[in-house]
Every structure is written in structure tokens, then in C-alpha cells.
Amino acid sequence: MLTKFETKSNRVKGLSFHNKRPWILASLHTGVIQLWDYRVGTLIDKFDEHEGPVRGVSFHYSQPLFVSGGDDYLIKVWNYKLRRCLFTLHGHLDYIRTVQFHHESPWILSSSDDQTIRIWNWQSRTCISVLTGHNHYVMCALFHPKEDLVVSASLDQTIRVWDIGALRKKGVSPADDSLRLSEMNSDLFGGVDAVVKYVLEGHDRGVNWAAFHPTLPLIVSGADDRQIKLWRMNDTKAWEVDTLRGHGNNVSCVMFHAKQDIIVSNSEDKSIRVWDVTKRIGIQTFRREHDRFWVLAFHPEMNLLAAGHDSGMIVFKLERERPAFSVSGDSLYYVKDRFLRIYDFFTQKDSQVIPIRRPGSLILNQGPRTLSFSPTENAALLSSDVDGGCYELYILPKDSNGKGDALQDVMRGVGGSAVFVARNRFAVLDKINNHVIVKNLKNDIVKKSSLPFAADAIFYAGTGNLLCRSEDRVVIFDLQQRIVLCDLQIPFIKYVAWSSDMEYVALLGKHVIIVANKKLVHQFTIHETIRVKSGAWDDNGVFIYTTLNHMKYCLPNGDSGIIRTLDVPLYITKVSRNIVCCLDRNGKNCPISVDPTEYMFKLSLLKKKYDKIMSMIKNSQLFGQAIIAYLQQKGFPEVALHLVKDERTRFNLALECGNIQTAVASANEIDEKDHWYRLGVEALRQGNASIVEYAYQKTKNFERLSFLYLITGNIQKLSKMMRIAEIKNDVMGQFHNSLYLGDIHERVRVLEKAGHLPLAYITASVHGLKEDADRLGKELGDNIPSLPKGKVPSLLIPPAPVLSCADWPLLRVMTGIFESGLDNIGKAENEEDDDALDADWVEDLDIDDVIGMQNGTVEILVENSDAIEGIDEEGGWDLEDLELPPEVATPKASINGHSAGFITPTVGMPVSQIWIRDSSLPAEHAAAGNFDTALRLLTRQLGIKNFTPLKPMFLDLYVGSQSYLRAFDSAPVISIEIEKGFSETYGGSVPHAPALVFNFSRLDEKLKTAYRATTDGKFAEALRLFLNILQSIPLTVVYSRREVDEVKEMILLAKEYVIGLKMEVMRKEIKDDMTRQQELAAYFTHCNLQTVHLRLALTNAMTICFKAGNYMTAANFSRRLLESNPPKEIQAKKARQVLQACEKNMKDATDLNYDFRNPFVVCGATYVPIYHGQKGVSCPYCGSRFVPSIEGKLCTVCDLAVVGADTSGLRCSPSQVR
């Protein structure tokens, strides 16, 4: 059984497949009807108007309808598009067991516990016939798929076949008057619409289900007597053919398979059984532990079944439908209908090669699963699941000429997978012994290799190499050297597709595609919600793959998209230009023509083939929001700019790519305030003051315009802005402009005119305008404000502009291909002169632009000369000096657009990304701030799972490789990445390597400090230091092979001291267990310590054991101490004395778990000895040994890695990668 979808719910009593869409209806014992999409696995809708269990449900064949019948005696017809019940049919007097739509007529068939079967016309919503005759509950009633027959099953132990031909004739309008008269007579005198044709008796208990064969005159039935009976019928009679026994409880449902000669049944014995119709024996049984089965349903067109049980339902297939195939050059070899066939891709000629032997077993799903072909030897290798996995080797005739009639000699063997690895060699996987066996074409063993891990399948990976699959990873195994070349941890995969040059491989799982290079370095992953079925590479390095209902593409950078939808699942065999060759589930070759424009455009963009992109754009081969959004996302808004005509979209794209000229043109077309404002912001960012001025003029934004003139030093236009503010009667505008200009007289006049005499007086006094101050003082009289004494005032004078009346300097770069090439598409040959482009194209602000604004009646001021003269007399401002220019014209770009121009430079790749681009060192990823990849690298290389001790080190690495520079007060802080610089190993600067705070010299200093703490007896401090060394090494980088060896040696040293010191600290905490104290002291002496520390440990162990009366053990320690030649005479003297005393009584008072004669290592968690020859597991990082029960737990020594994890090893130097 191949499970495709499963639900968890209440008991399912009715099921129905939709014949076109991937939907299934499930009616529950709770009264709810569920509509599921079994491809995606989602609940689409629920319908719950029935009261009580719903036992029958059925989709209509063509209309968006389904019918349901329940224990509320009601039949409801629903429209799933409208999501409501259309009408209800009343008539039955008891529970309704089954309902079904007729495949042609507008009829509904229902069976009920009221012992009747009813036929309804759902269009007229009436009951057109009642079939009576059963004398117990009618459990099932079904239409014949082709003929005018109905079969029913009842608890009265009979199956009845009803002829409803008269009902069909009655539904047809008679053209002849005589026929119409006979019909009237039959209605008048009680003519019968449906008659019993056969009554089948043979079951000993009530019959639960009966069904017709789709094509043959057969009926199958299942009953409470636990038997399945097969019946045959002809025009005159029906009889029992055979009985199938095997179920252990009531048979709930039984049906014929639509496409195979099998019967499928389910039962309350919690099993589904498959039976062979011809041999009438059981083939397979599928069981559930706790759920009884109640109902079965077949898909009308696909090889799908569904079964309802106590806790939900399951959608499944009995056999795989994927044909076994192999592509060799321009030919496709595949298996169909027990024949090996060959298909030529160019001539599209399909022919048989040889017949394939049938498996001796009757079990389903035993056909060939994979096919491997050797073109030079013309040999085919078929693998299947027969007998737990076997293969068949066929040597094909070279002059078959498409006949393929003769049965060839076949060589067989046992193996989980078989694949060619060379011209005349193939490899077979022995799952039991975990071996790969290499054989020749005579089926003789040539070589046998043991795999270092448990593999469940093998695939071709180049000559002499195998791609081996396990549950959570794949590896490439070299058969010659018998070593693992590379590995990759991934979810479970099903199929493998290599590119034509063997540079890339696509690993296809159930819902995932992982792409890696030939060294299994992960490139990207694609996740799909619908099952992935197949895939193949095209000549351009694009991976084309299919899901259940789509054909899709995947680019080398991981971008994907849909090529087309599929009506049925297809399996891609070869991709050649715009032709995708596929096999369907029936083994039929289907060459499909596709449009590759979209993915070829994206591929050209990825590979920077700009000439091809220009050709596509010129030919207008692709348009659409998806392409435009993709170009924006990938940083090519300038390309997208040439694909759109909508002005708003063009404006947004122009701003994104910094094309200010196009943005101005689009803004003029749109002419909305918001767009002018955004244009001004972008132009200001680029330093294009002319366009900023033009945008502010269009929005009448005088405050921003004045400030722009201030920062650009345009004093002349700033004076005109002050004049405009005066005409508008804008007092604040006047004051600001006078402040920007540094015009003290004007500021005093504005303040005086506004009535702020004290402020005007102070301003005049501070700035030395004595006449104005005296005049204002007289007006103020006694209210003259007092100025602070003893303080020097600072004058409000604006600073001189750095750059006057010009744009900010921009980087001049050559125009790219898109600006130079695409801008000329469709342009006229005559262009404006360069001189006109270089001119100052922003006109002076027209005073007419401010007429009619809210802050004053400028029209009256301008037209009334007397008023103007009055202003002139009072303020001394000469209106005649103000030239009023004509209406502002649309500006043109102030840059040359032919070969070079002022454009914003594109942002390069951040230094932190350069650091990690080709690095597999976790420390460099952490320094770049890419913590996620650093964690994944540590897990893959060292099996580290506990990252808490590493968190402060990660932060130190990141902070230590970053610096920040402040340029100006108004400018943002600049982040600067600090690189390593000079290295003697490289003979210069280390290319793109970050400066790291952890280095080997610091570790060496820590090691010396830890040694001193150990010597001084500060065990807690020493333990902390050694543990810190262990935890710092994964984030340390060295730059020579010699240093790599030293780092590995330091790991072993630190590990030994951590174990020993932990035992010593534990020993000091134990007060009342002398035996354990002696054991821990003894184990400490077997750690790999420095000689000075070993002598101290031996002295300590000798003393403890001597005091406890274990003289034999104490004597051993004293001998080892004397053999170390202690430099201090006091140590040697004490050891000799203990040895002399122990030799008088060489016995131990207590038995210790310690045998100094047998070599051992100490378990890092339980602190017990693991003697030579005993099983144990290791920490993948520090190498500490543990008893087998600790496997899968966190290492107690380094506190980082998982014990027994499979890893690739420590990476601490670029030299290891090289």
C-alpha cells in the first residue's frame, strides 16, 4: 500500500472521489461532510446540516453537485461552488445507507433501512420509482456503470439485480402516438418501472455490500458471514462462481478494481485485503491496529483508492505507476507491459526490445523500480522489490530490429539496488551486511566493499563512484579507494538527476528538491507543497521538474517558476531546447513543446548575457508583472524600466534605478504632488539641485525651496523668494528668508511690521543698527527691554556656502549596456545638441505661480501700482528689480546621455559576505555576523548541539571584527569591517579574512595558566580554564598545517585534564564512600597529564589507597611514581617507604573497579573504566570515550557536542580546505 493522504477524524461512513479535481468527500458518523484536497492535504470545506450520522455521499459526474443521505431520513443535494444545500428529498422512513448519482440520467439512487430502494429525479426533485422486495435493511444499492441495472444488498441475506430499462424509456419523450398511448395505459393500469431480474442467495448472514464489475458480467458481494462471493450473470440467469475466505469479521465493503483483475475488500477485522479475480486467492493484506474499516471508494479515472475507518480515512494506491526508465544518448529505454522498449527522441520511433520475465510472486508492486543501461555493452539492469529486493541483468540483442519477441537469458541476484558503475561493471547493494558488491557482466563478484554507514539505496555518481542514500544524508563513495569522498545531510530523497556534465546533481524528495555540486556542496533547496515526481537538466544548466500538476523550472541560483500546468502526472526523461520528453503513467511517450522564454531571460540575466537580454526586449517576447517584479527583486530596475508603459510603474522603477531623467518625464505625465515630492527626495539624494528646485516649484513648496537656495548658495533666487513671501503676506517666510540672507535691516523691518517691537529693538541693538534702535526705542518709551550686561552677543549670520549655485559633484561612469543600448530603442535619429543639455534648464520661479494662494491677494498687489509704490516707499524694496520670467518649462537632464553620464554607483558586495563566500570556517561566519551558517557548520563538522557556552564568543568575534567611523555630524556612522592583514603563512595579506579575537597564541597562554592552577591545587579554576580552551577551539582559526596539528593536540590535552579534574573535584565532594574515592583517584592517574601533575596524582592515589588498606594497589602507584624519577627526594623517599610497607602484605582490603594490568580509558560521564575490547562511543569533537548508553546525549566533557554524532571533522584553517 502506497499511502498518499490520511486524515484524522471521527468514523468515516461514506466516501466519494471527484472524477476531475483532486477532491474526496468523506461523510462522518458525527453528521459532518468533509471536502478534502488529497494532493495538497488540506480541508477545503465542511457541510453539517444533517442531524446524526451521514452514511452515503456521492459526487455528480459533470455538475458541481454532490448528494448525501443520513440517519435523519433525508437526502440532500449540495452545490459545492455555492457551498450550500440546494434542496432536500423526503420519502425514506428510516436510515439511508447509500446514495449515488447516475452517470447519464438525472437520477439519484438511494437505499434505506426502510427495506426500499428509491430512484429520484434530482432535476424535478421527485421520487420516480420505489424498488420493494427486500424484507430487511437494504445496506447498499448501486447503478451498473453501463447498463440499465441496479444491484442491491440486504441483511435478508440476498443480493438482488433490478432491471430499470423501462424507467429509462419512460424518461424519453415518445415521438409516436402509439407509444405515447401505451405509456398512458401503463400508467393507468400500474405498469412497472423496475423489475427484479435475479435474486442471488448464498450468504449465511446479512449482506453488507454488492458491486458490479466495470466491464464483465460479474458481481461481487461481502457479508456478515465473513465471506466474499463472486457471481456471474447472463441474460437469463445468475449463479455463484466462487467464495473468497480470509476475513476474520464482517465484510464491510468490497469492489472490483477498475484497471486490474483484482478485488479489494475491507472488514471490521481492521484489514484491507486484495484478491486475485482469476486465481481467486488472497494476494495482500493491509492492517491497522485499532481501526475497523467501513467503506471503500475507487477513483473513476486514476489508480487511487480510499478507505474509511474508525478514526478517519486513507487515500492510497496498490502499485507504483512510475515506469522504470533510463536515458542513454538519444534513446530512452523503459519498461511497459512486461516488455523492455526503446524510444528514439529524434525519430520518435518506439519499439519492443525484449520481454521481461514476470515475478513468481503474486504480491502487488513487484514490477521493476529502476533501470540502469550500459550503452557500450548493450546491457540492461532491472531492480525490483521481489523477495525483499533483487535485480535482473539482460544482455540485449544488437540486431533486434524492433521485434523483441524472443525471451532472453537473464541473470538474477539479490540486492536492494543495482546500478552500472563502469562499462562492464555494476554495483549491487547488500542491505543486510551493508556491503556494496561489484560484479561483471557474467554476474561474478569482482569486489566487495563495506560501507561506513547504513545505506538503503545506491545511485550512479560517475565512473567508479556511487551516491549512497540513508535516511538523513547522502554520500559519494569511491569504490576503488573504498572511502567516502563527500557527504551531505539532507531529508530523505527518492530520485537523483545528474546534469549532463556531471557538475551538479538534483536530489528529489517527496516535497523537496536539493541541488548540490559534484562534491555535494549544498547550492540551494526548493520546497513544494505538492509531491515532486521527476526532473531533468537541460543543456543550459536549468533544472526542469514536474509535480503532480505542474511543470516547473529551477535556475542555478535557486529561482523557480511554473512553465505550464499538467492534466496528468508526467515523468521527465529528457529536455532538449523547447521540447520536454516525458513518460506518463501508462508508459506512453509524450514530447511536450514549452515556451522557454521566461527562464532563458532570467538565466541570461543571471549569467549577464546582456546582448541576449536586449534581443529579447527588442523583440517584445515577454511582458507582465511577474517579470517586472523579478527584475526589481534581482536589482535590475533599469531593465524592467524598458518593459513597462504605465507611467506610475515607470516612475517607481526610474527612482529605484536612479534614472532621474525618466522619473522627471513620468512625473510630468502623472503631475501629482506626491510624485513630485518623491522626485525631489531622490534628486536631493543624488545632489541634482536643478531637478530638486524644479520639483519644489511644481509643488509650490516655498519653504523647502528657500532652504535649497540657502544650501546651494543661490543668493539671487533667495532674494526673490523673500520678495514672493512679502507679496504673499507671509511674515514667517519673509523672516526666514531674511535670516537665510543675513539681511539685518529686513529682519528688523519684518519684526517691526509684525508688531514685535521689543524683538526688533533687540535685533537692531545687537547688530549695531543705532538709528533703527533709537527710533524703536522712542516708540517703546518706558517698555524698552534691558539687554544682559557683561555678555558678548553672537550675531545670526548664515555661513558662506561651500559650493554655490551648482549640483553636487557626482561620480562620472560609462553608461551601461542597458542605458546606452535600450535607451536608443525606438528613438528618433535627430537628437538635441549637447550644448542644450549642458545648459541651466531651470527657469526662474514665476510670480504668476503664487497668484491665487491662500496667504494673500497677490493679484491686487501686482495690478495696483499705487500699492506697489507704497511698499517701495516704506521698505525700500524696488519691485522693478524683480524680473518675472515666463511659465516654468519642463527641465531636461543636465548630463550627457550618449556614452557617459552622472549615475549613482551601484552598491558592491559587503565585505562580510566576501568573508563567508568560500569559507567553511565557523569563526569567519560568526565574525561576519552570519550566526545561522556558523551554527550549521559547527553542527555538521563537530556535532555541536549546545551553543549556550559559545554565545559570548560569537558576540566577541562579531564585535571584534567591526569598527565604526564617524565622518560628519550630519552623516551616518560608517561601519568598517576589520580584515586580518599580513600573515607570514601566506607571505602577505590573507585574502578576505576577518580579524579574529581568538587565536592560537591566546590559547597557548591560557594553557600555561591552567597548568599553573593545576600545580597549585586550584582545581576549580584549572577546570574552568581547560573547559574554556575546549570551547574556544571551534572558533579559532590558524593558518598552517603545523598549527592545525597543534590545535588537535591541544584538544586532546584539554580533554584529558577536564576529565581528570572533574574526577578530582568529585572525589573531594565524596566524604563517606572511601571505595569510590580510591577509584576516582586511581582513574586520575591514567589521564594523559604532564609529568609534574602525574606525579602529584600518583602520590595522592598512593596515599589514599594505603590509608584504606589497599596495599597491592598502593604498591602499584608507588612503583609508577618511582619510575617517573621524581626530582624531589621527599617524594621518592615516601614512595619507597610505602612500597616497603605494602610488600609485607600484598592484599587489598576492598575490591575496586580498577585493573591496572588491563589498558582502559575513563568514561567521561559515569567515570568508570572502558577496558580494551569493550564497546564504547566517542564525542565527535573532543574525542572523549563513553559507555554505549550515553550515545545521543550531550558530551559531559566539552559540554558542546552530541555523543556518537556523525560529523565531517574539525575545520580550523584555510589550509585544510586547500
Image (cartoon, rainbow, N blue to C red):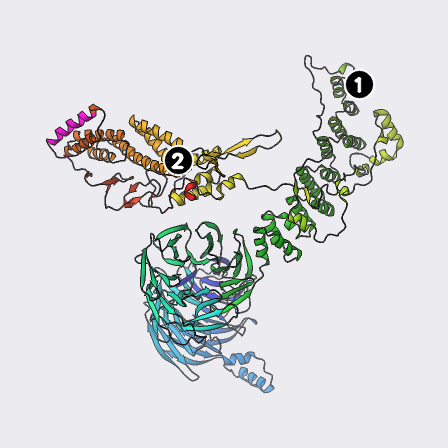
Q: Is residue 704 above or below residue 581?
A: above
- Determine which quarter of the picture holds residue 395: bottom left
**Residues shaded magenta:** 1131-1150
| Mark 1 or mark 2, earlier in chain | 1
Which residue is label 1 attached to? Answer: 772
Neighbour tally class for label 2: few under 14, some 14-19, many 20 plus, Cα within 10 Å: some
Neighbour tally class for label 1: few under 14, some 14-19, many 20 plus, Cα within 10 Å: some
92 left or right, relative to 798: left
Report the magenta stretch's main SS: helix
* Magenta stretch holds residue 558: no
Quick one: which residue is furthest to the bottom in this view?
Answer: 178
Which residue is label 2 attached to? Answer: 1032
In the rendered view of the protein, which quadrant contains the N terminus?
A: bottom left
Residue at 41% in and 36% down: 1036
Q: Choose between 122 and 338: the one closer to the eye.
A: 338
Whether residue 46 is visible: no
Q: Choose between 678 and 404: the one closer to the eye.
A: 404
* Magenta stretch holds residue 1133: yes
Rendering coords of residue 570 (x, y %): 49, 64
Mark 1 or 2, closer to the camera: 2
Q: Tell me the SS state at disc 1.
A: helix
Disc 1 to disc 2, how far (Cα)? 77 Å
Q: Amino acid at mark 1?
A: Asp
Rendering coords of residue 1022 (x, y %): 32, 30
Q: Is residue 21 above or below residue 975?
A: below
